[in-house]
Amino acid sequence: MAGSSLLTLLDDIATLLDDISVMGKLAAKKTAGVLGDDLSLNAQQVTGVRANRELPVVWSVAKGSLINKVILVPLALLISAFIPWAITPLLMLGGAFLCFEGVEKVLHTFEARKHKEDPAERQKRLEALAAQDPWAFEKDKVNGAV
């Protein structure tokens, strides 16, 4: 009798562990699409970096992305586990922010087409860029990509 009770208990524990792993897999699958947007590096983010610095820049972006994932994935899983009703409003806020960024990009593109830069302005901009520290410039590019 005691042997069958022990086996029943072990079976219940195994069932619970299986359920936990399935729920964790499901939660991770649901949040993977949200958090996978920075897997590919936007080529425009690292334009202007010398060729011999491209791999270190990509490595820096990968490290920054990994740090973001270490923070965001557990946070997303906790939100999914404890306050699942908050996921939809958070996704809507994120979508609204992405729409805002897209509209801003389009408006800047149209504004740049209307505004023609004269040679004096261009020379000032290039001189300011040349005076900038290359390591600070590279760090700004990496931070913009992460």
Image (cartoon, rainbow, N blue to C red):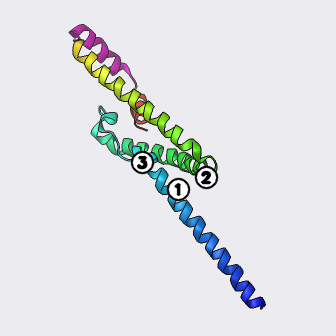
Residue 134 shows in the view: no
What mark, if any, has residue 81 been given in the picture? Answer: 2
Above or below, 126 against 134 in this view is above
* Residue shown at the point (27%, 10%) measured from the top left: 121
* Labels 2 and 1 touching (C-beta < 8 A): yes
Q: Which residue corresponds to mark 1?
A: 27
Q: In screen coordinates, is 54 left or right of 89?
A: left
Vertical relation: 43 (above or below) 35: above
Callout 3 touching callout 2 (CB < 8 Å) = no
Three-letter amino acid code at disc 2? Ala
Structural crowding at the residue carrying mark 3, measured as other residues with C-alpha within 10 Å and reported as few (<14), some (14–19) or many (≥20) = few
Q: Which mark is residue 93?
A: none
Looking at the image, which is closer to me, 49 or 1?
1
Q: Nearer the viewer, residue 74 or 29?
A: 29
Q: Mark 3 = which residue?
A: 36
Which residues fall within the magenta stretch?
116-132
Residue 18 against residue 99 in the figure, above or below: below
Quadrant the N terminus occupies: bottom right
